Image (cartoon, helix red, strand yellow):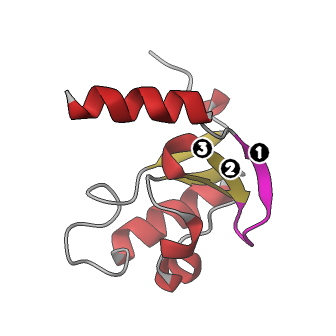
Amino acid sequence: MYDTNKIKLIVCDIDGTLLLPKQQRLTEKTRQAFRKAMDKNLKIMINTGRHFTFLQESLFTDLPMDYIGTINGGCLKDRNGKTLDKHPMSEQTMRTLTEISRE
């Protein structure tokens, strides 16, 4: 059995995980679960393929996240939008991927 007392961070996706299609807000049950996790001093992070500017405002009021992984992990931000770390793709990698996608 895993010792859940060792958990320090909860990471969740948004689309299709926290929010179902056409859903704009977290459910009350989900909000309560995150509040309970925070009461245990757990950090909350969302990770998404979206850019920070495409996150709906309701996520910031509904979800007490400390960190946001955006652009599929390409950029790590705090909840205020401050960039904490980034991993840009090189131009050569982008060209290679573009060529592969054309095949």
Question: Picture coordinates of residue 53 (x, y %)?
Answer: 56, 74
Circles 3 and 2: CB atoms closer than 8 Å: no
Which comes before the other along the chain, label 1 or label 2?
A: 2
- Number of residues whose C-alpha sits closer than 10 Å to that of mark 1, classed few (under 14), some (14–19) or many (20 or more): few
Question: Picture coordinates of residue 84 (x, y %)?
Answer: 80, 51
Which comes before the other along the chain, label 1 or label 3?
A: 3
Q: Name the residue beneath numbered marker 2.
A: 76
Residue 39 against residue 73 in the figure, above or below: below
Range of magenta residues: 78-86
* Type of amino acid under label 1: Asp
Which residue lies at the image location 62% right of the left edge and 68% below the top edge?
64
Farthest residue, direction top: 1
Q: CA distance from mark 1 to mark 2?
A: 5 Å
Q: Secondary structure at mark 2?
A: strand
- Number of residues whose C-alpha sits closer than 10 Å to that of mark 2, classed few (under 14), some (14–19) or many (20 or more): many
Q: Name the residue beneath numbered marker 1.
A: 85
Q: Secondary structure at mark 1?
A: strand
